[in-house]
Amino acid sequence: MFMPAKKKIYLLVSVICFVDVLLFSLVLLPLFRRVKANADDLNTQKISLAVLAAQSESLGDFQKNVDDLENYSQLVRSAFVDASAPVEFIEFLEEQAESYHLQLIASPFDSPPIKGDLWSSIGTRINVEGQLADCLRFVEMLENSRWVITIINFNLQKVVANDSEAIPRGEAFLSLEVKAFSGQPSVFKKN
């Protein structure tokens, strides 16, 4: 069987096209898919690397600020009263009363938790006697001090001088009830 040259050329072109389609579908198409998958994986890894670099930088900044955070934490903790023994708070009151030339009597009392209080507290009764301006400055100093407190009772009276008194008293008597917070969560008793 002998084929004319024209048919041979058509057959050869058809075979070459068929081989090209097979080569493309069996070899090149999977290769392109793998290259695309690898490129996508590379992009994902670049994004992950950028995120890790940002987290590393953030961690470095955090480590630089650890000392500042510790100092701030110490400052915050020092604003609270030790619930078991409020000695430091009472010493503070005594020092301030002395600096304002006031006579002070301070006595702690049990302060029951009130609904809405975030922290447990220690109550302190403060009786101060001295000049009116000094008493008012003492209260202002107490409100602006580092301690986390709330004044729950305030009573300021002018002292009337007695002729029978040998020792002159101050012109004002200040009675305060102060709630000093401990920083510990408040515990409510169930009735």
Image (cartoon, rainbow, N blue to C red):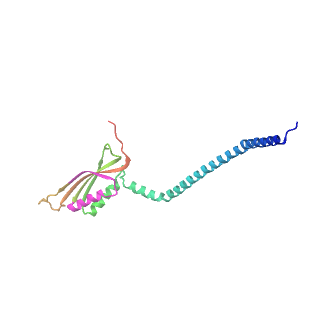
Give residue 34's position: percent from left, percent from top. Answer: 68, 46
Position above or below: 32 against 63: above
Left or right of 179, for residue 160? left
Residue sitting nearer the eye, 37 or 132: 37
Which residue is more in the foreground, 11 or 43?
Answer: 11
Where residue 180 appears, as percent x and y from the top left, is 32, 51
The image shows a total of numbered marks equal to: 0
Vertical order, 142 against 122 (above or below): below
Q: Work out which quarter of the rendered image holds the C terminus and state it.
A: top left
Q: Which residue is drawn at 38% across and 47% down?
A: 184
The spot of residue 165 in percent (x, y) is: 14, 60
In the image as oriented, which residue stretches furthest toward the right? 1
Going by the picture, which residue comes out furthest to the left?
Answer: 163
In-front residue for pair 103/114: 114
**Residue 136 drawn in magenta:** yes
Q: Is residue 44 above or below residue 7?
A: below
- Magenta region: which residues? 130-155
In reply to whether residue 56 is colored magenta, the answer given is: no
Residue occupying image coordinates x 83% and y 41% = 8
- The reply, left or right, for residue 57 in relation to residue 74 is right
On the image, the x and y values in percent for residue 1 come to: 88, 36
Considering depth in this image, is 166 or 40 the residue closer to the camera? 40
Left or right: residue 12 compared with residue 82: right
At a point 23% along the width and 59% down the height, the residue shown is: 136
